[in-house]
Image (spheres, rainbow, N blue to C red):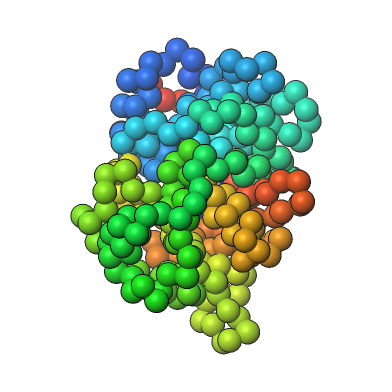
Amino acid sequence: MDVFGTGVATGNPVAVVLDADGLTDDDMARFARWTNLSETTFVCAPVDAAADYRLRIFTPGGELPFAGHPTLGSAHAWLSTGGRPADEGRIVQECGIGNVAVTVDGDDRFAFVAPNLLRTGEPDAQTLERVRAACGLRRSDVVAAQWVDNGPPWLGLLLTDGQRVLDVTPDLAAFAPDDFVGLIGPWRAAEGSPGPGDADYEVRAFAPGTGVPEDPVTGSLNAGLAVWLRGTGAVPERYVAAQGTALGRTGRVQIVDDGAHIWVGGRTRTVISGTVDL
């Protein structure tokens, strides 16, 4: 599946394995290493009766309790291959952080409810300095920083503008093995910004310890950033984030705060379908 793209193969791929109940943890981890994608998922029967299915999510480096683009891609794959949710138009996914609601709008637009943050607050000065240096950022480049852990332990940095986000050339060796670092900066069209006309913010995600140094388009990070920045009033109720630009992708993530939930959505597309021998 290609998720958050604007055309063919322009977003973030996820490999979705259906009917995965017979696989062991080792089987799943091995296949995820083999695909070498940022995530590979395995759709299993739910344990919770309130869920439509249970999702296991693996990076090449190990299992995650939640991830955003795999949630949307897996929901689309499950639905398009005969899955039937208990409530029409609303899928309930069971995963490591609990149940996550996913809505369907048309054939290719899916959105999930941003999970509550498991960890918030500002990082300690030593951690912030280490991450800032690893990203090659000046102190003046960072407007604010906060933990936005919603399964993956993201540390979010709000930068001065979208161009500064794109200009970052990270020193990957300087990151700690468990670092999950996300950058976001606004595109200021009113000031003649050179940024994309269809996006309000630029986002990048670095997690070298997962085996994928920079993730092309990241639902969990965008969800965490939205929860944080909506809470401070730093972003509007609706906005579009561009991600993947630095990697030659044109990912677009749509954020909508309806007053009850923050929804994280985008387009999904089946690129390859078939069988896999595990």
Residue 54 higher or lower than 169, as above or below:
above
Residue 76 higher or lower than 173, as above or below:
above
* Residue sitting at x 37%, y 37%: 59
* Residue sitting at x 38%, y 49%: 180
* Residue sitting at x 33%, y 70%: 137
State the residue in front, 226 or 208: 226
Q: Position of residue 184 (x, y in %)?
A: 49, 64
Report which quarter residue 181 is drawn in: bottom left
Residue 197 higher or lower than 210, as above or below:
below
Residue 74 higher or lower than 271, as above or below:
above
Q: Position of residue 118 (x, y in %)?
A: 52, 39
Q: Is residue 19 left or right of residue 125?
A: right
Can you name the residue that lies furthest to the bottom here? 192
Report which quarter residue 136 is drawn in: bottom left
State the residue in front, 205 or 28: 205
State the residue in front, 106 or 160: 160
